[in-house]
Image (cartoon, rainbow, N blue to C red):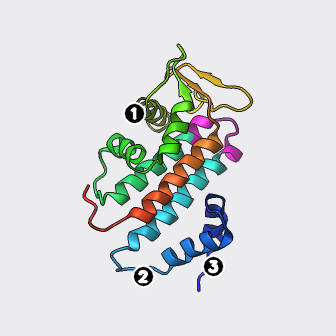
Amino acid sequence: MPNNQQWLDFYSPYFSSAQEVTDFVEQIEAIPIGDPLHRRKILMHQTQRLVSIAIDIDQIRPKKQALQLAFLIISCENISKLFHNYGGDMQSKHYVKKFFEVFLSDQDKARLQAGFTTHAMQAMQVNQIVESLYSIRCDVVHEGKYWGFHFMEDIPMLNIDPDLNAYISFDELRDIIVRSSINAINAYSPNTAP
């Protein structure tokens, strides 16, 4: 049996017991190549890989949270495209939006909405928040601008471009994305249309 420790370590905070996470990982790791459900294994691996980069990037570029956010959004895009069996290299924003629409629980949607406001302190809907987060990802990926966004740490953060106050920490958003990715992993079917 292959060493599953990296998957167990990563996913254990998202399950209520060691047995639950072990069952989750071992069931998915047992899916062989060629099985119609093998993509579940790819989804599980990709979530761990991309979210881990988002976590680890802080060691290379401390306090450059736009970089961390970019990798979280890249993970959302990757999981959404894999889940929906999309084989192209376009429609990034569409699939990021689909990730937040399809995989977030109602509780995580509520937390996401509570996590951001405009500068005028107006509440934002999930689709507005995703637009803003995707815009930050684009600034990093296309412009190399990775210094203008910050999550809440001890106090809420006022971000200028885009107009976004953050009342959510990196860890909280990371957890929302991992929980949502687990929902995608568990729900994947080879019959899911793009």
Comes first in the chain, label 1 or label 3: 3
Can residue 145 be seen here? The reply is no
Residue 77, given in percent of the width and then of the height, sits at 41, 49
* Residue 156 highlighted magenta (yes or no): no
Residue that badge 2 annotates: 32
Identify the image quadrant of the N terminus.
bottom right
SS type, badge 3: loop
Q: Is the residue 72 above or below the residue 44 in the image? A: above
Q: Residue furthest top?
A: 120
SS type, badge 1: helix
* Residue type of the residue flagged with mark 3: Asn
Give the distance between the C-alpha atoms of the residues marked 1 and 3, in whole angstroms: 39 Å
Residue that badge 3 annotates: 3
Residue at the image point whose x is 70% and y is 39% from the top: 62
Q: Is the residue 182 above or below the residue 134 in the image? A: below
Give the distance between the C-alpha atoms of the residues marked 1 and 2, in whole angstroms: 37 Å
Disc assigned to residue 127: 1
Q: Which residues are magenta?
A: 58-68
Residue at the image point whose x is 49% and y is 52% from the top: 180
